[in-house]
Image: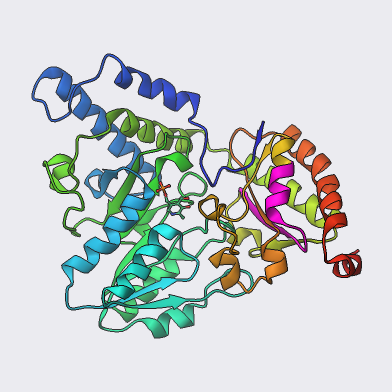
Amino acid sequence: MIYLDNNATTRVAPEVLDAMQPYLSEFFGNPSSAHGLGREMKRAIEHSREQVANLIGATETSEIVFTSCGSESDNWAIRGVLATQPNKKHIVTTQVEHEAVRNVCRLLETEGYEVTWLGVDGNGELDLNELRSALRPETALVSIMMANNETGVLFPIEEIGRIVREKSEAVFHVDGVQAVGKIPIDLKSTSVDLFALSGHKLHAPQGIGALYLRKGLSLPSFIIGGAQEQGRRAGTSAVPNIVGLGAACQFAVEDNNHDLIERLRNRLEDEILANISNARLNGSPDRSKRLPNTSNISFEYVDGQNILMHLDEAGICVSTGSACHSTTHESSPTLRAMNVPFTAAQGSIRFSLGRYNTDADIDTTLNVLPTIIEKLAAMSPYEKELAALR
Ligand code: PLP
């Protein structure tokens, strides 16, 4: 199998599994227990907290709270901020956020909040002047992602943070789920107040996430119960997963191979765009404005689901847009916001590489893809349009 779907989820790294193993066998205690076994569990959690804080450049380990996933972190951040400022009813976000932010904001609109949905241009980039003019005294929250899950486009979080501070008193939440482990992050040099991350995007298991809360910021607990996580998130800690997340963060710091991944991604992208006549890139052509692992490419006038199925038969895993909407047939909101025509959006494929990909994976993909596209193009009702592209 050739796995080019790392933005959907990643394989648990063997190093991460090794670190978790003792916490799935001999260290089985409850970290809230006062005995030695409980204390060992607590020590392991605090060690992981340091590893997470170190990867994202938090100032203090207490700024990290473990959650169950990126979606929980995003939901808690948004709901929590609004609960602390009941008189402010305005939110600023973008049209290209993941559902974990977008659908919460949509729901909030039905609960009396006003949401400003910032648009993007054809490259998937924001207009910061639009952000400047959206901010007002009653803006409670600005929620903007660091890296787009579908296109890999990066938003300039430092600059956005400066604008938010200059022009408002809003709290600044960043969905960092796709960025962590893929690019260097140093939150202490930004004005980010809340930052969500998720273990399964960086070779930790599924079911573990974290929320960074800048020191001094306090949110009401999202899950009510015991006093775990310093009273900020109830529920017995998932120690094996927490240990896995910590180990994955450490691994990302010590053995980052962003350059290799980027080289492979560039090769894949360059050759597809050069050799397949109906291929077009979705996202900024300036690669410094995209994650190093992601290429979202439309094969115009061809159906993306069919491409995915043929690649799957060849043992190659990719996504059409985001995995989360692979079951619906609407084109993705991100591509719609970028004004990608329907006939191109329907044929979009996201290739997202990871640390276990090799040149041989790229060779095979480049070998089989043109034949698949040719075959599907021959069946396309858009014969004339395809001929014009050749
Ligand atoms: N935010 C972004 C940008 C994502 O890509 C995802 C998952 O794909 C999430 C949030 C949700 O994370 P989780 O799957 O851990 O709930």
Looking at the image, which residue is at 51% across and 49% down? 183
- Residue range (magenta): 293-310
Looking at the image, which residue is at 39% across and 64% down? 103
Quarter of the picture holding the N terminus: top right
Residue 169 quadrant: bottom left
> Residue 130, percent across and down?
47, 82
Is any part of residue 351 visible from this angle?
yes
Quarter of the picture holding the C terminus: bottom right
> Residue 31, percent across and down?
17, 28
Looking at the image, which residue is at 48% across and 51% down? 178
**Foreground pick, 371 / 143:** 371
Q: Residue furthest top?
A: 26
Q: Is residue 158 left or right of residue 368?
A: left
Residue 170 quadrant: bottom left
Residue 296 quadrant: bottom right
Q: How many marks?
A: 0
**Foreground pick, 346 / 64:** 346
